[in-house]
Amino acid sequence: MTMTELAPPRAGRREWVAFTVLALPLLLVSMDVSVLYFAAPEISRDLHASSTQQLWIFDVYGFVLAGMLITMGAVADRIGPRRLLLVGAACFSATSLLAAYAGSAAHLIVARGILGVAGATLMPSTLSMLRSLFPDERQRGQAIGAWTGIMTGGIALGPVLSGVLLQHFWWGSVFLINLPAMALLLVLGPILLPRGERREQPLDLPSSALSLTGVLCTIYGIKQWAADGFELRWAVAIAIGGAVLVAFAHRQFRDAHPMVPPTLLRNRSYCAALLGNTVCSFALVGNAVLFTAYLQLVLGYDPLAAALWSIAPTVCVGAVAPFAAPLGVRLGKPLAAALGLGAGACGFGILATVGTSSLWRALIGAGVLAAGLVVTMTLASELVLSSVDEGQAGRGASVSEAASELGGALGIALLGSIAAAGYRAQAADTLPAAVAHGPAGGSLAQAVGVAAGLPDSLAQQVLSAARSSYVHGVHLAVLAGLVLLAGASLALCRSLRRQPGR
């Protein structure tokens, strides 16, 4: 048998068209995480939403999506990823229509929750299907690079699209844009997409309940901690979530038909890929929150302008993502992933030098961070798929996505908490005495609000001191991120030395 006969078939035009059909709804699902950024005020006014309802309208989609990922990965392996993808697309379309014409805040919260369930069907299905579409490893790496770039770019594009639509249409239009792409998937999906392997085994409902409860409690507690500061109730929520996830993992080793096969949890390559994706999401999402606040509250851009500037790092992602897989082939995936983490650490190093008027330096730092980490994320996602057989691809992808969601929530909470602590420490010494011990000393946003009601001379002193204090807090946060990424990169490099033949 010749090497040509042994080589897996290469994907042609049909497979790349199929990938495009998958990519459009994937882009919209990722955009739905942030698409309400500008629509929230209009929704609150039209639906008379309370402050609590406003928070749930914005957050329930991401919470439910994260909580349902593992379950939907198991369902994808049981009924086939294509079938689950098409059912999810139909549900996403119908629920988007309901959300667009919601008549009350409660109605919209329920619709957003159902959208989260539907979104959870699409994410692991699309990633696992790349294995069937692209049997050739190099082409699969290119497709995963594009998949990673689309996922990252969608979150950044959501606020921009929302702002543009709301200049011409009512708030429901941000949901109706989902319909054309989902319709395209429903029409062309049965023609272009492979069925995928199916495994007839019962769905472990207790494990589903444990994974949903554990992920929801953990991410909810972490996000509330980031928003409100540390409180006992959020610590309790995180502890409950962690305990439930431990119980979930324990059940996987004892159950006859586990939702997540123990072979995955014992696979060192797979676990390394999970850790890589978690660390990258921690850094990217945590920095995105700090970066957005810097653009708006320090540099003074309005929300739409800040959202437009935030696209710049996404451009770097799009430019670098196609080269991640070839770099992995040339250097070896572990070394390329380590270099990606090192580049991300350099990006954090650049961000640690920004001042109160350093737009371009901040953009360069965020771009280097994103470009480096997209290399590692692409190679980690490729390793996730190559570490499992086709019948486990849905579950393998879903656990990876859930780990990324958890990493992002931790990044917001921990880097945000470090930045907030740094702000408070410096603001106490630099704010004018008249406001230092009031709300202005708590956060930059509160300082901006306080300054609006002060005489011009005092307001400028408050704003100058508050902005400098916030930048000080950002420096501390990104230095912590730098240490994390540099440590992860060095750990990967050390592991290479232990591998024979390298």
Image: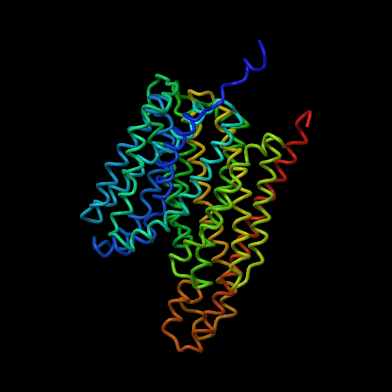
Query: Whole-percent x and y of residue 51?
Result: 32, 63
Q: Nearer the viewer, residue 68 or 457?
A: 457
Q: What residue is shown at x 20% (from left), y 55% (from top)?
A: 103
For residue 139, above or below residue 416: above
Q: How is the image coloured?
A: rainbow
Q: What residue is shown at x 52% (from left), y 84% (from top)?
A: 460
For residue 31, above or below residue 182: below
Q: Nearer the viewer, residue 361 or 376?
A: 361
Q: What residue is shown at x 56% (from left), y 76% (from top)?
A: 427
In this view, the residue farthest toward the left is 103
Count of numbered marks: 0
- Dividing the picture into quadrants, the one containing residue 469 is bottom right
Query: Whole-percent x and y of residue 373?
Result: 61, 48
In this view, the residue farthest toward the front is 13
For residue 407, above or below residue 386: below
In the drawing, does residue 258 fall left or right of residue 478? Answer: left
Query: Whole-percent x and y of residue 54?
Result: 32, 59
In the drawing, does residue 270 fall left or right of residue 501? Answer: left
For residue 500, above or below residue 123: above
